[in-house]
Image (cartoon, helix red, strand yellow):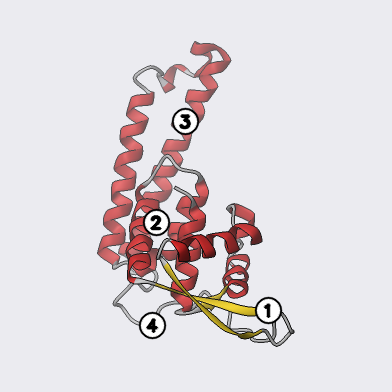
């Protein structure tokens, strides 16, 4: 699963209707170009592809005030909304994906209800613990990595990553349980998008 689909669907959804430059601006504002494959070319490609797939609806509007070609604005469709929430739920439970997927999910987790988000994160902890258990079937952490030569460092890294990932997720769960953040249905959400810009 690629984070770019979730990033672009989420950015368009937050605006209601947005053109490519707005989506790109939001993703750069979030720093996504640093921790994901959300580069300008991939953003515009994703917008066009998802419009072809029926996840976004494209609208041609007036030419930009800078004199460029007609700008295309996108809005998320019902099918796109379903895909967005499917990808969001997967991003919060997946433990074996690239970090950009979890990072993206964290950016949109408040679009879910608090209890659902908690349930998904608890599922993530269980998955990490199950995966760790399969690693230690062949590797005993207390005996240290040297027991398997330098290859033991691979398993050592996996175990430490699992322990760190599980503990970080448990800490996040506790913060959410204690009332951190505004989730769907709880009031005005945090606004994490740039204001509209009609000058480009």
Precedes in sequence: disc 3 or disc 2: 3
Residue 167, by quadrant, is: top left
| Helix, strand or loop under label 1 | loop
Q: Is residue 127 left or right of residue 163?
A: left
Which percent across, then down, holds residue 135? 38, 25
Residue 30, by quadrant, is: bottom right
Q: CA distance from mark 1 to mark 3?
A: 50 Å
Precedes in sequence: disc 2 or disc 4: 2
Mark identifier at residue 158: 3
Residue under pointer 1: 69
Q: Nearer the viewer, mark 1 or mark 3?
A: 1
- Using the image, determine if residue 183 lies above or below residue 5: below
**Quarter placement of the C terminus:** bottom right
Precedes in sequence: disc 1 or disc 2: 1
Residue under pointer 4: 188
Q: CA distance from mark 2 to mark 4?
A: 21 Å
Residue at (29, 50) in percent of width and height: 122
| Helix, strand or loop under label 4 | loop
Is residue 107 at all visible to an observer of this figure? no
- Using the image, determine if residue 14 lies above or below residue 196: above
Precedes in sequence: disc 3 or disc 4: 3
Is residue 113 at all visible to an observer of this figure? yes
Q: Nearer the viewer, residue 185 or 28?
A: 28
Q: CA distance from mark 3 to mark 2?
A: 21 Å
Q: CA distance from mark 1 to mark 4?
A: 36 Å
Q: Are marks 3 and 2 in contact (CB under 8 Å)?
A: no
Residue under pointer 2: 172
Q: Are marks 1 and 2 in contact (CB under 8 Å)?
A: no
| Helix, strand or loop under label 2 | helix
Q: Is residue 164 left or right of residue 81?
A: right
């Amino acid at each position: 699963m690629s984070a770019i689909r979730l990033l672009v669907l989420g950015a368009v959804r937050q605006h209601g209707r947005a053109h490519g430059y707005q989506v790109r601006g939001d993703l750069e504002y979030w720093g996504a170009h640093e921790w994901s494959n959300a580069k300008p070319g991939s953003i515009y490609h994703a917008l066009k592809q998802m419009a072809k797939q029926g996840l976004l609806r494209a609208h041609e509007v007036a030419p930009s005030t800078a004199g460029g070609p007609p700008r295309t604005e996108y809005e998320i469709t019902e099918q796109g909304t379903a895909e967005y929430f499917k990808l969001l739920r997967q991003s919060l439970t997946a433990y074996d994906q690239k970090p950009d997927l979890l990072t993206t999910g964290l950016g949109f987790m408040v679009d879910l209800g608090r209890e659902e988000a908690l349930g998904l994160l608890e599922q993530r902890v269980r998955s990490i613990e199950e995966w760790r258990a399969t690693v230690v079937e062949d590797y005993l952490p207390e005996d240290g990595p040297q027991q398997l030569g330098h290859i033991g460092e691979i398993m050592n890294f996996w175990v430490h990553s699992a322990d760190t990932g599980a503990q970080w997720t448990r800490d996040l769960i506790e913060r959410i349980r204690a009332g951190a953040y505004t989730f769907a249905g709880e009031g005005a959400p945090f606004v994490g998008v740039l204001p509209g810009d009609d000058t480009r």
